């Protein structure tokens, strides 16, 4: 569950100072700039790792030279602090880039709603992000957001295609999620 820490927008320096004062806690800016304390669960972390690995393997194949994948990189976009769960950004970006990530991935947790995630996606797109994935673990679905396009809801065998943003990237939504255990000890997509 998310706990509000600050209703007012913090600067990058104030946010980093807050993190430094409380290294045992985890903070994230909301779409409106307020700061909340996060407590993501096991599945959130597992999915974050899985998506990061999938994107990193794609980048390692030489698919998009000059770009790298990271988990929870802090961006300062004209005073809006954002920390996507997973992002693809320029490889030599500053430690706290002032440039929007190429791809931002936000994974739903108990601390946010679909409308909050969609608001955050809108902020990413306003700041120049070319593609946003909103990932919903419970329904094993994804909303794909691109500037100037309708939001696309994908699930199951639907394909997530990178288009001009991630040329050649193509994966089914099922592949984004860990296999589900079955009653007989096997796993299924």
Image: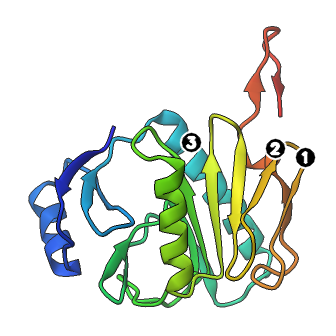
Corner quadrant of residue 139: top right
Task: Tell me where residue 12 appears, x and y as whole percent.
Answer: 23, 79
Q: Which of marks 2 and 3 is in front?
A: 2
Mark sitting on residue 46: 3
Which residue in the structure is indicated by mark 2? 174
From the viewer's perspective, is residue 169 above or below residue 65? Answer: above
Mark 1 or mark 2: name the one nearer the start of the chain.
1
Q: In this view, does 172 lie to the left or right of 130?
A: right
- What residue appears at the point 52 percent right and 42 percent down from the top-left corner? 44
Task: Tell me where residue 33 appears, x and y as whole percent.
Answer: 29, 69
Q: In which quarter of the image is the N terminus?
A: top left
Helix, strand or loop for disc 3: helix
Q: In this view, does 162 lie to the left or right of 116?
A: right
Q: Are marks 2 and 3 in contact (CB under 8 Å)?
A: no
Helix, strand or loop for disc 2: helix
Mark sitting on residue 157: 1
Helix, strand or loop for disc 1: loop
- Pick whichever, 139 or 99, lies toward us: 139
- What residue appears at the point 34 percent right and 79 percent down from the top-left corner? 80
Task: Tell me where residue 116 appears, x and y as whole percent.
Answer: 46, 56
The crowding category of the residue bearing disc 2, from other C-alpha atoms within 10 Å (few below 14, some 14 to 19, many at least 20), is some
């Amino acid at each position: 569950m998310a706990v509000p820490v600050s209703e007012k927008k913090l600067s990058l320096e104030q946010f980093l100072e807050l993190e430094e004062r409380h290294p045992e806690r985890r903070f994230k800016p909301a779409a409106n700039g307020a700061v909340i304390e996060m407590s993501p669960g096991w599945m959130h972390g597992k999915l974050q790792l899985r998506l990061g690995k999938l994107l990193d393997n794609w980048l390692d194949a030489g698919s998009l030279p000059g770009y790298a994948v990271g988990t929870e990189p802090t961006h300062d976009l004209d005073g809006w602090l954002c920390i996507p769960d997973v992002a693809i950004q320029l490889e030599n970006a500053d430690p706290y880039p002032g440039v929007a990530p190429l791809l931002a991935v936000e994974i739903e947790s108990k601390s946010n709603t679909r409308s909050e995630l969609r608001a955050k996606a809108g902020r990413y797109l306003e700041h120049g992000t070319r593609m946003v994935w909103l990932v919903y673990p419970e329904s094993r679905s994804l909303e794909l957001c691109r500037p100037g396009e309708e939001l696309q809801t994908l699930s199951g065998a639907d394909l997530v295609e990178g288009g001009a943003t991630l040329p050649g990237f193509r994966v089914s939504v099922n592949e984004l999620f860990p296999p589900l255990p079955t009653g007989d000890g096997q796993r299924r997509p």
